[in-house]
Image (tube, rainbow, N blue to C red):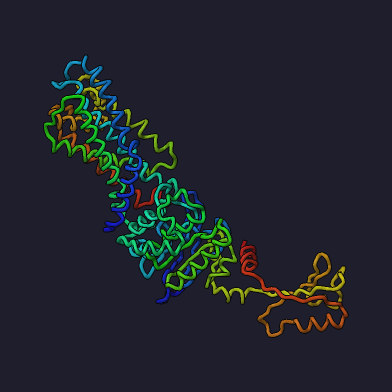
Amino acid sequence: MNTYAIRVIYKQEMMRAWETLLQSFASPVLSTSLYFVVFGSAIGSRIQHVEGVSYGSFIVPGLMMLALLTQSIANASFGIFFPKFTGAIYEVMSAPISFLEIILGYVGAAATKSFIIGLIILITASFFVPLHIAHPVWMVAFLVLTCISFSLFGFIIGLWADDFEKLQLIPLLVITPLVFLGGSFYSVSMLPPAWQTVTLFNPVVYLISGFRWSFFEVSDVSVAVSLSVVLVFLAACLLTVWWMFKTGYRLRQ
Amino acid sequence: MSQSSQTIVSISDLSKTYANGYQALKHVSLDIQRGEILALLGPNGAGKTTLISIICGIVNASSGTVTVGGHDIVSAYRITRGMIGLVPQELTLGAFDTVWNTLSFSRGLFGKKPNPAYIEALLKDLSLWDKKNSVLMALSGGMKRRVLIGKALSHEPTVLFLDEPTAGVDVELRKDMWALVRRLRESGVTIILTTHYIEEAEAIADRVGVINHGELLLVDDKLALMHKLGKRQMIIELETPLSAVPAELVAWGLELSEDGKELVYTYDPHKSNTGVNGLLQVINTAGLPVKDLRTTQTSLEEIFVSLVNKRS
Protein backbone atom coordinates (compact mmCIF):
# COMPACT_ATOMS: atom_id res chain seq x y z
CA MET A 1 0.00 0.00 0.00
CA ASN A 2 1.23 3.50 -0.91
CA THR A 3 0.90 4.99 2.57
CA TYR A 4 3.00 8.05 1.69
CA ALA A 5 0.48 8.97 -1.00
CA ILE A 6 -2.47 8.59 1.39
CA ARG A 7 -0.66 10.75 3.94
CA VAL A 8 0.19 13.60 1.54
CA ILE A 9 -3.31 13.72 0.03
CA TYR A 10 -4.91 13.67 3.49
CA LYS A 11 -2.51 16.32 4.79
CA GLN A 12 -3.05 18.56 1.76
CA GLU A 13 -6.84 18.37 2.09
CA MET A 14 -6.74 19.05 5.83
CA MET A 15 -4.37 21.98 5.27
CA ARG A 16 -6.92 23.44 2.86
CA ALA A 17 -9.51 23.36 5.65
CA TRP A 18 -7.19 25.09 8.14
CA GLU A 19 -6.26 27.73 5.59
CA THR A 20 -9.95 28.51 5.10
CA LEU A 21 -10.92 28.10 8.73
CA LEU A 22 -13.83 30.54 8.66
CA GLN A 23 -15.41 28.94 5.61
CA SER A 24 -14.70 25.37 6.68
CA PHE A 25 -15.71 25.41 10.33
CA ALA A 26 -17.09 28.75 11.49
CA SER A 27 -19.67 29.04 8.72
CA PRO A 28 -21.56 25.74 9.36
CA VAL A 29 -21.40 26.32 13.11
CA LEU A 30 -22.85 29.81 12.73
CA SER A 31 -25.69 28.71 10.46
CA THR A 32 -26.57 25.80 12.76
CA SER A 33 -26.51 28.13 15.77
CA LEU A 34 -29.02 30.33 13.96
CA TYR A 35 -31.29 27.29 13.51
CA PHE A 36 -31.09 26.69 17.26
CA VAL A 37 -31.93 30.30 18.01
CA VAL A 38 -34.88 30.39 15.60
CA PHE A 39 -36.32 26.87 15.86
CA GLY A 40 -34.98 25.77 19.23
CA SER A 41 -35.39 28.88 21.38
CA ALA A 42 -37.86 31.22 19.64
CA ILE A 43 -40.34 28.81 18.02
CA GLY A 44 -39.38 25.74 20.07
CA SER A 45 -40.38 27.36 23.35
CA ARG A 46 -44.00 27.50 22.07
CA ILE A 47 -44.04 23.90 20.81
CA GLN A 48 -44.96 21.00 23.11
CA HIS A 49 -42.56 18.13 23.70
CA VAL A 50 -42.09 15.75 20.77
CA GLU A 51 -42.08 12.07 21.78
CA GLY A 52 -41.24 13.12 25.32
CA VAL A 53 -38.26 15.30 24.29
CA SER A 54 -38.23 19.10 24.36
CA TYR A 55 -38.43 20.48 20.82
CA GLY A 56 -35.11 22.31 21.11
CA SER A 57 -33.31 19.10 22.04
CA PHE A 58 -35.33 17.02 19.57
CA ILE A 59 -33.98 18.92 16.54
CA VAL A 60 -30.30 18.62 17.56
CA PRO A 61 -29.65 15.26 15.79
CA GLY A 62 -31.50 16.49 12.68
CA LEU A 63 -29.53 19.72 12.55
CA MET A 64 -26.28 17.85 13.03
CA MET A 65 -27.23 15.55 10.16
CA LEU A 66 -28.15 18.52 7.98
CA ALA A 67 -24.68 20.01 8.52
CA LEU A 68 -22.89 16.67 8.24
CA LEU A 69 -24.51 15.70 4.96
CA THR A 70 -24.03 19.05 3.25
CA GLN A 71 -20.47 19.49 4.56
CA SER A 72 -19.41 15.92 3.73
CA ILE A 73 -20.66 16.28 0.18
CA ALA A 74 -19.26 19.79 -0.28
CA ASN A 75 -15.81 18.94 1.12
CA ALA A 76 -15.34 15.70 -0.78
CA SER A 77 -16.80 16.88 -4.09
CA PHE A 78 -14.73 20.07 -4.13
CA GLY A 79 -11.60 18.19 -3.01
CA ILE A 80 -11.53 16.06 -6.15
CA PHE A 81 -13.31 18.47 -8.52
CA PHE A 82 -10.84 21.35 -8.05
CA PRO A 83 -7.74 19.44 -9.25
CA LYS A 84 -9.89 18.14 -12.13
CA PHE A 85 -10.86 21.71 -12.95
CA THR A 86 -7.29 23.05 -12.81
CA GLY A 87 -5.85 19.98 -14.55
CA ALA A 88 -3.63 19.14 -11.58
CA ILE A 89 -5.44 15.78 -11.32
CA TYR A 90 -2.99 14.45 -13.94
CA GLU A 91 -0.51 13.92 -11.13
CA VAL A 92 -2.83 11.72 -9.09
CA MET A 93 -3.86 9.79 -12.20
CA SER A 94 -0.24 9.12 -13.15
CA ALA A 95 0.89 8.18 -9.63
CA PRO A 96 1.34 4.58 -8.43
CA ILE A 97 -1.78 4.71 -6.30
CA SER A 98 -4.91 2.55 -6.22
CA PHE A 99 -8.51 3.78 -6.10
CA LEU A 100 -8.73 2.70 -2.47
CA GLU A 101 -5.69 4.79 -1.54
CA ILE A 102 -7.13 7.80 -3.38
CA ILE A 103 -10.38 7.34 -1.44
CA LEU A 104 -8.56 7.01 1.88
CA GLY A 105 -6.77 10.29 1.20
CA TYR A 106 -9.56 12.46 -0.21
CA VAL A 107 -12.62 10.91 1.45
CA GLY A 108 -10.76 10.35 4.71
CA ALA A 109 -9.93 14.07 4.92
CA ALA A 110 -13.47 15.15 3.95
CA ALA A 111 -15.00 12.78 6.53
CA THR A 112 -12.59 14.01 9.20
CA LYS A 113 -13.59 17.62 8.54
CA SER A 114 -17.28 16.73 8.72
CA PHE A 115 -16.74 14.77 11.92
CA ILE A 116 -15.03 17.77 13.52
CA ILE A 117 -17.89 20.03 12.37
CA GLY A 118 -20.39 17.55 13.85
CA LEU A 119 -18.64 17.63 17.21
CA ILE A 120 -18.41 21.43 17.19
CA ILE A 121 -22.14 21.67 16.45
CA LEU A 122 -22.88 19.24 19.26
CA ILE A 123 -20.86 21.36 21.68
CA THR A 124 -22.55 24.52 20.34
CA ALA A 125 -25.99 22.93 20.80
CA SER A 126 -25.23 22.15 24.42
CA PHE A 127 -25.09 25.92 25.06
CA PHE A 128 -28.66 26.36 23.77
CA VAL A 129 -30.53 23.25 24.91
CA PRO A 130 -30.15 20.54 27.56
CA LEU A 131 -28.56 17.47 25.96
CA HIS A 132 -28.32 13.88 27.09
CA ILE A 133 -26.81 11.20 24.87
CA ALA A 134 -28.30 7.82 25.77
CA HIS A 135 -25.95 5.72 23.57
CA PRO A 136 -22.72 7.68 22.98
CA VAL A 137 -20.96 4.80 21.19
CA TRP A 138 -23.83 4.42 18.74
CA MET A 139 -23.96 8.19 18.33
CA VAL A 140 -20.29 8.23 17.32
CA ALA A 141 -20.82 5.18 15.10
CA PHE A 142 -23.69 6.87 13.22
CA LEU A 143 -21.67 10.06 13.03
CA VAL A 144 -18.63 8.30 11.54
CA LEU A 145 -20.67 6.17 9.13
CA THR A 146 -22.61 9.20 7.91
CA CYS A 147 -19.44 11.26 7.43
CA ILE A 148 -17.75 8.48 5.45
CA SER A 149 -20.71 7.46 3.29
CA PHE A 150 -21.73 11.02 2.35
CA SER A 151 -18.13 12.04 1.76
CA LEU A 152 -17.96 9.09 -0.64
CA PHE A 153 -21.17 10.30 -2.26
CA GLY A 154 -19.66 13.77 -2.58
CA PHE A 155 -16.52 12.25 -4.08
CA ILE A 156 -18.68 10.59 -6.75
CA ILE A 157 -20.34 13.94 -7.51
CA GLY A 158 -16.89 15.56 -7.78
CA LEU A 159 -15.73 12.88 -10.21
CA TRP A 160 -18.92 13.09 -12.25
CA ALA A 161 -19.26 16.88 -12.44
CA ASP A 162 -17.52 18.61 -15.30
CA ASP A 163 -18.54 22.14 -14.34
CA PHE A 164 -19.40 24.13 -11.21
CA GLU A 165 -23.13 24.03 -11.92
CA LYS A 166 -23.22 20.24 -11.86
CA LEU A 167 -21.16 20.30 -8.68
CA GLN A 168 -23.94 22.25 -6.95
CA LEU A 169 -26.86 20.54 -8.67
CA ILE A 170 -27.30 17.40 -6.54
CA PRO A 171 -26.51 18.98 -3.14
CA LEU A 172 -28.97 21.82 -3.77
CA LEU A 173 -31.78 20.06 -5.61
CA VAL A 174 -31.63 16.59 -4.05
CA ILE A 175 -29.79 16.45 -0.74
CA THR A 176 -31.09 19.63 0.93
CA PRO A 177 -34.79 18.81 0.23
CA LEU A 178 -34.26 15.21 1.37
CA VAL A 179 -32.73 16.37 4.66
CA PHE A 180 -35.43 18.96 5.30
CA LEU A 181 -38.13 16.40 4.50
CA GLY A 182 -36.30 13.64 6.36
CA GLY A 183 -37.48 14.53 9.83
CA SER A 184 -34.82 17.05 10.83
CA PHE A 185 -37.40 19.30 12.47
CA TYR A 186 -40.21 16.85 13.19
CA SER A 187 -41.07 13.28 13.93
CA VAL A 188 -42.38 11.26 10.98
CA SER A 189 -45.28 10.19 13.22
CA MET A 190 -46.49 13.83 13.21
CA LEU A 191 -47.29 13.53 9.45
CA PRO A 192 -50.59 12.28 8.00
CA PRO A 193 -50.49 8.48 7.35
CA ALA A 194 -50.16 8.85 3.56
CA TRP A 195 -47.15 11.17 3.89
CA GLN A 196 -45.60 8.86 6.46
CA THR A 197 -45.52 6.13 3.80
CA VAL A 198 -44.04 8.52 1.22
CA THR A 199 -41.41 9.69 3.71
CA LEU A 200 -40.17 6.15 4.20
CA PHE A 201 -38.80 6.28 0.64
CA ASN A 202 -36.46 9.05 1.77
CA PRO A 203 -33.17 7.41 2.85
CA VAL A 204 -32.26 10.38 5.05
CA VAL A 205 -35.21 9.50 7.34
CA TYR A 206 -33.35 6.34 8.38
CA LEU A 207 -30.16 8.27 9.09
CA ILE A 208 -31.82 10.89 11.24
CA SER A 209 -34.00 8.34 12.97
CA GLY A 210 -31.06 6.13 13.94
CA PHE A 211 -28.98 9.12 15.01
CA ARG A 212 -31.86 10.52 17.10
CA TRP A 213 -32.33 7.14 18.76
CA SER A 214 -28.69 7.25 19.95
CA PHE A 215 -29.57 10.52 21.75
CA PHE A 216 -33.10 10.01 23.09
CA GLU A 217 -34.00 6.35 22.47
CA VAL A 218 -36.87 7.49 20.26
CA SER A 219 -36.93 6.67 16.55
CA ASP A 220 -39.26 6.64 13.54
CA VAL A 221 -37.92 3.30 12.27
CA SER A 222 -36.01 0.52 13.99
CA VAL A 223 -32.30 1.13 14.65
CA ALA A 224 -31.34 -2.06 12.83
CA VAL A 225 -33.09 -0.83 9.70
CA SER A 226 -31.41 2.57 10.03
CA LEU A 227 -27.97 1.00 10.35
CA SER A 228 -28.64 -1.36 7.42
CA VAL A 229 -29.66 1.53 5.16
CA VAL A 230 -26.48 3.46 6.02
CA LEU A 231 -24.31 0.40 5.38
CA VAL A 232 -26.05 -0.37 2.07
CA PHE A 233 -25.58 3.25 0.99
CA LEU A 234 -21.91 3.08 1.96
CA ALA A 235 -21.42 -0.14 -0.01
CA ALA A 236 -23.23 1.31 -3.05
CA CYS A 237 -20.99 4.41 -3.00
CA LEU A 238 -17.85 2.28 -2.69
CA LEU A 239 -18.94 0.09 -5.60
CA THR A 240 -19.68 3.15 -7.73
CA VAL A 241 -16.26 4.70 -7.07
CA TRP A 242 -14.57 1.35 -7.76
CA TRP A 243 -16.45 1.12 -11.08
CA MET A 244 -15.53 4.71 -11.99
CA PHE A 245 -11.84 4.05 -11.44
CA LYS A 246 -11.94 0.64 -13.12
CA THR A 247 -13.57 1.95 -16.28
CA GLY A 248 -11.92 5.37 -16.13
CA TYR A 249 -15.36 7.01 -16.30
CA ARG A 250 -14.87 10.80 -16.56
CA LEU A 251 -11.22 10.26 -15.61
CA ARG A 252 -9.25 8.24 -18.13
CA GLN A 253 -11.52 8.29 -21.17
CA MET B 1 9.96 -4.20 -33.36
CA SER B 2 12.06 -6.49 -31.24
CA GLN B 3 12.56 -5.54 -27.62
CA SER B 4 16.19 -5.49 -26.53
CA SER B 5 17.59 -5.28 -23.00
CA GLN B 6 18.35 -1.64 -23.74
CA THR B 7 14.66 -0.92 -24.37
CA ILE B 8 13.13 0.98 -21.45
CA VAL B 9 9.71 1.72 -23.00
CA SER B 10 8.12 -0.61 -25.50
CA ILE B 11 4.89 0.36 -27.27
CA SER B 12 3.17 -2.28 -29.33
CA ASP B 13 0.26 -1.80 -31.74
CA LEU B 14 -1.21 0.97 -29.58
CA SER B 15 -4.52 2.52 -30.64
CA LYS B 16 -6.84 4.99 -28.97
CA THR B 17 -10.33 5.98 -30.03
CA TYR B 18 -12.07 8.54 -27.79
CA ALA B 19 -15.74 8.27 -26.78
CA ASN B 20 -16.67 10.83 -29.47
CA GLY B 21 -15.26 8.50 -32.14
CA TYR B 22 -12.05 10.45 -32.75
CA GLN B 23 -9.16 8.10 -33.42
CA ALA B 24 -6.15 9.73 -31.81
CA LEU B 25 -3.68 6.86 -32.25
CA LYS B 26 -3.52 4.19 -34.95
CA HIS B 27 -1.46 1.05 -34.29
CA VAL B 28 1.60 2.83 -32.96
CA SER B 29 4.65 0.68 -32.22
CA LEU B 30 7.84 2.13 -30.83
CA ASP B 31 10.81 1.10 -28.69
CA ILE B 32 12.54 3.76 -26.62
CA GLN B 33 16.12 3.04 -25.60
CA ARG B 34 17.48 3.46 -22.12
CA GLY B 35 19.28 6.77 -21.64
CA GLU B 36 18.31 8.38 -24.95
CA ILE B 37 16.54 11.65 -25.71
CA LEU B 38 13.71 10.97 -28.12
CA ALA B 39 11.87 13.90 -29.65
CA LEU B 40 8.35 13.32 -30.93
CA LEU B 41 7.49 15.88 -33.58
CA GLY B 42 4.03 16.50 -34.88
CA PRO B 43 1.47 19.21 -35.51
CA ASN B 44 -1.41 19.96 -33.12
CA GLY B 45 -3.77 17.00 -32.75
CA ALA B 46 -1.20 14.55 -34.10
CA GLY B 47 -1.58 12.23 -31.08
CA LYS B 48 1.60 13.10 -29.16
CA THR B 49 -0.11 13.98 -25.88
CA THR B 50 -2.46 10.99 -26.12
CA LEU B 51 0.53 8.69 -26.55
CA ILE B 52 2.27 10.13 -23.49
CA SER B 53 -0.96 10.13 -21.46
CA ILE B 54 -1.50 6.42 -22.11
CA ILE B 55 2.05 5.51 -21.07
CA CYS B 56 1.70 7.55 -17.87
CA GLY B 57 -1.70 6.04 -17.00
CA ILE B 58 -3.80 9.16 -17.49
CA VAL B 59 -5.74 7.80 -20.47
CA ASN B 60 -6.84 4.21 -21.12
CA ALA B 61 -5.71 2.67 -24.41
CA SER B 62 -8.33 1.18 -26.71
CA SER B 63 -5.96 -1.61 -27.77
CA GLY B 64 -2.29 -2.51 -27.74
CA THR B 65 0.26 -2.84 -24.97
CA VAL B 66 2.94 -0.73 -23.35
CA THR B 67 5.73 -1.92 -21.09
CA VAL B 68 8.09 0.24 -19.03
CA GLY B 69 11.24 -1.46 -17.77
CA GLY B 70 9.70 -4.73 -18.95
CA HIS B 71 6.55 -4.27 -16.84
CA ASP B 72 3.06 -3.88 -18.27
CA ILE B 73 1.59 -0.43 -17.55
CA VAL B 74 -1.82 -1.91 -16.63
CA SER B 75 -1.05 -5.02 -14.61
CA ALA B 76 2.11 -3.63 -12.99
CA TYR B 77 1.07 0.02 -12.85
CA ARG B 78 2.65 0.65 -9.46
CA ILE B 79 6.10 -0.28 -10.78
CA THR B 80 5.81 1.50 -14.14
CA ARG B 81 4.29 4.73 -12.82
CA GLY B 82 6.94 4.88 -10.11
CA MET B 83 9.58 4.88 -12.86
CA ILE B 84 7.96 7.71 -14.83
CA GLY B 85 7.94 11.46 -14.36
CA LEU B 86 5.65 13.66 -16.43
CA VAL B 87 5.84 17.35 -17.20
CA PRO B 88 2.48 18.24 -18.75
CA GLN B 89 1.91 20.70 -21.55
CA GLU B 90 -0.37 23.03 -19.56
CA LEU B 91 0.70 24.90 -16.43
CA THR B 92 -1.52 22.71 -14.27
CA LEU B 93 -0.65 23.72 -10.74
CA GLY B 94 -2.69 24.43 -7.64
CA ALA B 95 -2.79 28.08 -6.68
CA PHE B 96 -2.21 28.26 -2.95
CA ASP B 97 0.52 25.70 -2.26
CA THR B 98 4.11 26.75 -1.74
CA VAL B 99 6.87 25.53 -4.07
CA TRP B 100 8.37 23.38 -1.31
CA ASN B 101 5.03 21.81 -0.35
CA THR B 102 4.02 21.00 -3.90
CA LEU B 103 7.31 19.17 -4.59
CA SER B 104 7.05 17.31 -1.28
CA PHE B 105 3.44 16.39 -2.16
CA SER B 106 4.53 14.96 -5.52
CA ARG B 107 7.28 12.90 -3.92
CA GLY B 108 4.87 11.40 -1.40
CA LEU B 109 2.25 10.75 -4.06
CA PHE B 110 4.73 8.55 -5.88
CA GLY B 111 5.38 6.53 -2.71
CA LYS B 112 8.76 7.98 -1.78
CA LYS B 113 9.54 8.83 1.82
CA PRO B 114 10.31 12.51 2.52
CA ASN B 115 13.84 13.58 1.59
CA PRO B 116 14.30 17.30 2.27
CA ALA B 117 17.96 17.19 1.14
CA TYR B 118 16.96 15.89 -2.30
CA ILE B 119 14.14 18.43 -2.68
CA GLU B 120 16.56 21.19 -1.68
CA ALA B 121 19.14 20.04 -4.26
CA LEU B 122 16.43 19.82 -6.91
CA LEU B 123 15.14 23.33 -6.19
CA LYS B 124 18.67 24.69 -6.34
CA ASP B 125 19.30 22.91 -9.63
CA LEU B 126 16.12 24.49 -11.02
CA SER B 127 17.04 27.93 -9.67
CA LEU B 128 13.94 27.86 -7.47
CA TRP B 129 15.56 27.68 -4.04
CA ASP B 130 14.89 31.34 -3.26
CA LYS B 131 11.23 30.77 -4.17
CA LYS B 132 10.72 27.72 -1.97
CA ASN B 133 8.22 29.48 0.29
CA SER B 134 6.42 31.37 -2.48
CA VAL B 135 2.86 30.41 -3.32
CA LEU B 136 2.46 29.00 -6.81
CA MET B 137 0.06 31.64 -8.08
CA ALA B 138 2.69 34.32 -7.40
CA LEU B 139 5.21 32.73 -9.78
CA SER B 140 5.91 33.72 -13.37
CA GLY B 141 5.06 31.35 -16.24
CA GLY B 142 8.69 30.29 -16.60
CA MET B 143 9.00 29.54 -12.90
CA LYS B 144 5.77 27.53 -12.94
CA ARG B 145 7.21 25.51 -15.81
CA ARG B 146 10.31 24.80 -13.70
CA VAL B 147 8.12 23.84 -10.73
CA LEU B 148 6.35 21.31 -12.96
CA ILE B 149 9.73 19.86 -13.92
CA GLY B 150 10.67 19.76 -10.24
CA LYS B 151 7.44 17.92 -9.41
CA ALA B 152 8.11 15.40 -12.16
CA LEU B 153 11.64 14.80 -10.85
CA SER B 154 10.72 14.81 -7.16
CA HIS B 155 10.43 11.01 -6.99
CA GLU B 156 13.66 10.38 -8.92
CA PRO B 157 12.17 8.82 -12.06
CA THR B 158 14.21 6.92 -14.64
CA VAL B 159 11.98 7.95 -17.55
CA LEU B 160 10.91 11.55 -18.00
CA PHE B 161 8.18 12.71 -20.37
CA LEU B 162 8.24 16.38 -21.31
CA ASP B 163 5.12 17.41 -23.17
CA GLU B 164 6.08 20.57 -25.05
CA PRO B 165 8.29 21.78 -22.19
CA THR B 166 9.34 25.04 -23.81
CA ALA B 167 5.99 26.12 -25.24
CA GLY B 168 5.57 29.81 -24.51
CA VAL B 169 8.89 30.31 -22.72
CA ASP B 170 11.53 32.84 -23.72
CA VAL B 171 14.74 31.96 -25.55
CA GLU B 172 16.94 32.16 -22.47
CA LEU B 173 14.76 29.84 -20.42
CA ARG B 174 14.46 27.48 -23.37
CA LYS B 175 18.25 27.17 -23.50
CA ASP B 176 18.33 26.63 -19.71
CA MET B 177 15.81 23.82 -20.16
CA TRP B 178 17.87 22.22 -22.89
CA ALA B 179 20.90 22.33 -20.59
CA LEU B 180 18.82 20.73 -17.82
CA VAL B 181 17.60 18.00 -20.17
CA ARG B 182 21.18 17.24 -21.17
CA ARG B 183 22.25 17.07 -17.51
CA LEU B 184 19.37 14.69 -16.77
CA ARG B 185 20.35 12.46 -19.65
CA GLU B 186 23.93 12.40 -18.35
CA SER B 187 22.56 11.23 -14.98
CA GLY B 188 20.94 8.27 -16.75
CA VAL B 189 17.37 9.49 -17.19
CA THR B 190 15.63 8.54 -20.43
CA ILE B 191 13.85 11.55 -21.88
CA ILE B 192 10.94 11.66 -24.28
CA LEU B 193 9.86 15.11 -25.33
CA THR B 194 7.18 16.31 -27.65
CA THR B 195 7.70 19.59 -29.35
CA HIS B 196 6.56 21.91 -32.08
CA TYR B 197 10.02 23.43 -32.19
CA ILE B 198 12.15 21.58 -34.68
CA GLU B 199 15.20 23.46 -33.47
CA GLU B 200 14.59 21.92 -30.04
CA ALA B 201 14.72 18.40 -31.46
CA GLU B 202 17.68 19.35 -33.61
CA ALA B 203 19.52 20.78 -30.60
CA ILE B 204 19.04 18.05 -27.99
CA ALA B 205 17.48 14.85 -29.37
CA ASP B 206 19.33 11.63 -30.18
CA ARG B 207 16.40 10.23 -32.15
CA VAL B 208 13.43 11.85 -33.77
CA GLY B 209 9.96 10.41 -34.28
CA VAL B 210 7.43 12.09 -36.53
CA ILE B 211 3.77 11.57 -35.69
CA ASN B 212 0.76 12.85 -37.60
CA HIS B 213 -2.95 11.95 -37.65
CA GLY B 214 -2.26 9.32 -34.97
CA GLU B 215 0.32 7.47 -37.05
CA LEU B 216 4.00 7.23 -36.33
CA LEU B 217 5.45 8.13 -39.71
CA LEU B 218 9.06 7.38 -38.85
CA VAL B 219 11.57 7.10 -36.03
CA ASP B 220 15.24 7.47 -36.75
CA ASP B 221 18.51 8.72 -35.42
CA LYS B 222 18.49 12.48 -35.83
CA LEU B 223 21.74 12.64 -37.77
CA ALA B 224 20.83 9.60 -39.88
CA LEU B 225 17.50 11.22 -40.67
CA MET B 226 19.13 14.41 -41.81
CA HIS B 227 21.66 12.33 -43.70
CA LYS B 228 18.99 10.27 -45.44
CA LEU B 229 16.47 12.96 -46.16
CA GLY B 230 18.54 16.11 -45.96
CA LYS B 231 19.37 17.94 -49.17
CA ARG B 232 22.03 20.58 -49.64
CA GLN B 233 21.69 23.67 -51.76
CA MET B 234 24.41 25.70 -53.47
CA ILE B 235 23.41 29.32 -54.00
CA ILE B 236 25.25 31.13 -56.74
CA GLU B 237 25.03 34.90 -56.40
CA LEU B 238 25.42 36.69 -59.75
CA GLU B 239 27.01 40.04 -60.58
CA THR B 240 24.21 40.89 -63.01
CA PRO B 241 20.61 39.70 -62.75
CA LEU B 242 19.23 37.18 -65.25
CA SER B 243 15.72 37.06 -66.73
CA ALA B 244 15.86 33.26 -67.25
CA VAL B 245 18.15 30.30 -66.58
CA PRO B 246 20.66 30.17 -69.46
CA ALA B 247 20.03 27.31 -71.93
CA GLU B 248 23.35 25.56 -71.21
CA LEU B 249 22.39 25.35 -67.46
CA VAL B 250 18.81 24.07 -67.88
CA ALA B 251 19.95 20.45 -67.62
CA TRP B 252 21.15 21.05 -64.01
CA GLY B 253 17.63 21.85 -62.81
CA LEU B 254 18.62 25.23 -61.40
CA GLU B 255 16.07 27.60 -59.91
CA LEU B 256 16.33 31.34 -60.49
CA SER B 257 15.41 33.67 -57.63
CA GLU B 258 12.64 36.21 -58.17
CA ASP B 259 15.06 39.11 -58.44
CA GLY B 260 17.18 37.12 -60.93
CA LYS B 261 20.30 37.57 -58.81
CA GLU B 262 20.66 34.02 -57.51
CA LEU B 263 20.79 30.56 -59.04
CA VAL B 264 19.95 27.71 -56.65
CA TYR B 265 21.29 24.19 -57.21
CA THR B 266 19.86 21.40 -55.01
CA TYR B 267 21.91 18.22 -54.66
CA ASP B 268 22.41 15.15 -52.50
CA PRO B 269 25.67 15.66 -50.57
CA HIS B 270 26.04 11.93 -49.92
CA LYS B 271 26.29 10.96 -53.61
CA SER B 272 29.79 10.28 -54.92
CA ASN B 273 29.17 12.74 -57.76
CA THR B 274 27.30 15.73 -56.47
CA GLY B 275 27.57 17.59 -59.77
CA VAL B 276 29.02 20.68 -58.10
CA ASN B 277 32.31 20.55 -60.05
CA GLY B 278 30.60 20.07 -63.39
CA LEU B 279 28.15 22.90 -62.73
CA LEU B 280 30.91 25.34 -61.79
CA GLN B 281 32.79 24.45 -64.97
CA VAL B 282 29.71 25.06 -67.14
CA ILE B 283 29.06 28.42 -65.40
CA ASN B 284 32.68 29.36 -66.03
CA THR B 285 32.48 28.32 -69.69
CA ALA B 286 29.22 30.22 -70.13
CA GLY B 287 31.02 33.33 -68.81
CA LEU B 288 28.48 34.09 -66.10
CA PRO B 289 30.01 36.62 -63.67
CA VAL B 290 29.71 35.06 -60.14
CA LYS B 291 29.74 37.43 -57.15
CA ASP B 292 29.58 34.85 -54.34
CA LEU B 293 28.89 31.18 -53.54
CA ARG B 294 27.36 29.60 -50.46
CA THR B 295 25.77 26.27 -49.40
CA THR B 296 22.94 25.48 -46.97
CA GLN B 297 21.83 22.18 -45.36
CA THR B 298 18.11 21.23 -45.23
CA SER B 299 16.95 21.65 -41.64
CA LEU B 300 15.02 19.10 -39.64
CA GLU B 301 12.09 21.47 -39.94
CA GLU B 302 12.09 21.24 -43.72
CA ILE B 303 12.34 17.45 -43.48
CA PHE B 304 9.44 17.40 -41.03
CA VAL B 305 7.25 19.67 -43.18
CA SER B 306 8.05 17.63 -46.25
CA LEU B 307 7.18 14.36 -44.46
CA VAL B 308 3.94 15.64 -42.99
CA ASN B 309 2.84 17.17 -46.28
CA LYS B 310 3.72 14.02 -48.21
CA ARG B 311 1.64 11.79 -45.89
CA SER B 312 -1.26 14.28 -45.75
Vertical arrangement, residue A95 with respect to residue A82, above or below: below
Pick the residue in front: B234 or B187: B187
Residue B111 quadrant:
bottom left
Give the total of numbered labels. Answer: 0
Pick the residue in front: A84 or B213: A84
Quarter of the image with the C terminus of chain B is bottom right
Pick the residue in front: B194 or A39: A39
Identity of the residue furthest to the front in this view: B130
Residue A118 quadrant:
top left
x%, y% of residue A242? 31, 49
Pick the residue in front: A214 or B152: B152
Vertical arrangement, residue B299 with respect to residue A118, above or below: below
Q: Is residue B75 visible?
A: no
Q: Is residue A53 visible?
A: yes
Q: Residue at x 64, y 63 (%)?
A: B309
Residue A70 quadrant:
top left
x%, y% of residue B70? 37, 70
Left or right, B24 with reference to A151: right
Q: Residue at x 13, y 38 (%)?
A: A137
Vertical arrangement, residue B84 with respect to residue B97, above or below: below
Q: Residue at x 35, y 51 (%)?
A: A245
Left or right, B214 with reference to A40: right
x%, y% of residue B195? 55, 62
x%, y% of residue A4? 29, 57
